[in-house]
Amino acid sequence: MGQQNGNAASYFVDRHVDEGQGGRTAFVECGAGGRSLTYAQLASEAGRMADLFQRHGISREDRAAMIVLDQIEFPVIFWGCLKAGVIPVPLNTLLSADYYEIILTDSRAKALFVSNELLPTVAPILGKLPDLRKVFVIGGESEGHLAFADELAKGEPSGTIAASADECAFWLYSSGSTGRPKGVRHVHGSLKATADTFGAQVLGARGDDLVLSAAKLFFAYGLGNAMTFPMAVGGAAALFKARPTPADMFAAMAEVKPTIFCGVPTLYAAMVAQMGDAAPAGTERLRLCVSAGEALPAEIGNRWKALTGVDIVDGVGSTEMLHIFLSNAPGNIVYGTSGVAVPGYAVRLVDEEGREVGPGEVGELLVDGPSAAENYWNQRDKSRATFEGRWTRTGDKYERTEDGRYVYCGRTDDMFKVSGIWVSPFEVEQALVTHPDVLEAAVVADRDEAGLEKPRAFVVLKNGASADGLEGALKEHVKAKVGAWKYPRRIDFVADLPKTATGKVQRFKLREGA
Ligand code: 3SK
């Protein structure tokens, strides 16, 4: 190990053991029979990965794809890769075989780690991947592939390879709202940068924190919440393997009693709708909640606070910036805004010519901060269009209020004009969800008989609400809330909205169907 080891594993994993804190719990699995892992066990298990890679011909800088649920093996494999200098590529566990084929081909992963529950999804494409050499199956039957537990047990633990903090450590794939997935390449130093900024200075993460994150570890948001933020301070995270339904989240909360809970607006909305008038069990130790993924409607934040007594810190981040760079902060929360730049980050708003816009004007949000990705793998044009020197373009439209807070106005490609005036689909959606019968809403532009763009809404009703006679009432409601020209000319009542795994509404799918 070098004297100055910039390898993130030496900071997040080995340091705790070196400082005599190896006996502290790092991870617990939710549910009956859930396992746990101390920092010392993590260092030792992850340390065996170098031997595993060597035996199977996987070398430094090779990519190792991970289709792994939130379970103890996730941190073992992720940190094991970093310790050995192999590049882990955690993938969304909800993708289809077609997407896995695109991503595994694009990344040229030589190894694949897959939870046995997900093997049937990916199995049909494994024969089509010329670069893939070994498949390691976690838990259950390995069906002709290598059993991860057996292969790991064969090796001896070794230390952490010396690496520069500026060296590529891992990739995440960004789905984007359209187009092919992009491999976002992050350096070792970015993991510590997000823990030192949002983790330490906004969350105030502490060694006695237990984090429960509905956002999964494959997602940059979940990776910070339930891995690097608690690990930076010797705290712990509860891992939840299944999809986070409100009922499961209530059960997980009651079981582990987290001090920090991280969710996305859709989940908070559904949880609030099911809470009745009382705080759910398991909120007694809760000191902070976090929301990201899309802007949190003010109604939801206020209702959650009224029921639990705990604020939701709403922030915005991106896979490219690794975590949240614009946020509200404990004690300084204005629901309906994304707050201000996280300490360590700078943001600015620019118009289409790149000129800064003033308060009250809408512009694209650019961000400068220590955790920006290096680039997109093999997508030079997209890299050049996104990473402009120190500044990273977010594709999000924002407005700055007179008091310096940022208010989300939609994606650059979701905004549209009605009668020459910009309409933010988000604004109309927010107005719709303040109606007592509406659970969720998404708004897209749709052309009328004259070929002009007008808002069209897709609305999910709350349990027990009826669509009969509601269309007119909702139109009036929006007119009254946000302005006459913005009301949806057409409303479709639907059972659910198309979303990415991380809870973002896929408006492009609604547009395609419109
Ligand atoms: O979508 C977000 O707001 C986000 C937050 C943190 C990390 C990553 C992302 C995409």
Image (cartoon, rainbow, N blue to C red):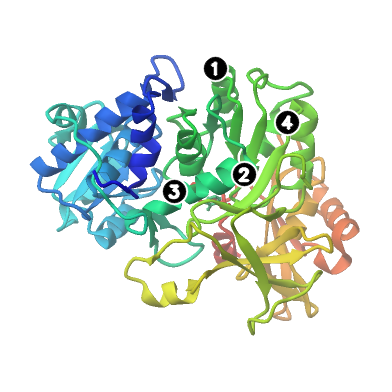
Dot 3 and dot 2 residues touching (CB under 8 Å): no
State the mark number for residue 201.
2
Residue assigned mark 1: 255
The residue lying toward the viewer, choosing from 157 and 104, is 157
Left or right of residue 6: residue 407: right
Which element is circle 3 on?
A: helix
Q: Marks 2 and 1, how far apart in space?
A: 28 Å
Judged by depth in the image, the label closer to the viewer, 4 or 3, is 3
Query: In this view, which residue lies farthest toward the top?
Result: 32
Left or right of residue 137: residue 298: right
State the mark number for residue 191.
3
10 Å crowding of disc 2: few (<14), some (14-19), many (20+): some
Viewport quadrant of the C terminus: bottom right
Q: Quadrant of residue 309?
A: top right
Picture coordinates of residue 188 (x, y %)? 37, 52
State the mark number for residue 310.
4
**Identity, as a three-letter code, of the amino acid under mark 1:** Glu
**Identity, as a three-letter code, of the amino acid under mark 3:** Leu
Q: Marks 2 and 4, how far apart in space?
A: 18 Å
Q: Is residue 119 visible?
A: no
Picture coordinates of residue 102 (x, y %)? 30, 60
The residue lying toward the viewer, choosing from 421 and 470, is 421
Judged by depth in the image, the label closer to the viewer, 2 or 4, is 2
Dot 2 and dot 1 residues touching (CB under 8 Å): no
Viewport quadrant of the N terminus: top left
Judged by depth in the image, the label closer to the viewer, 1 or 4, is 4
Which element is circle 1 on?
A: helix
Q: Quadrant of residue 33?
A: top left
Q: Residue at x 13, y 31 (%)?
A: 155
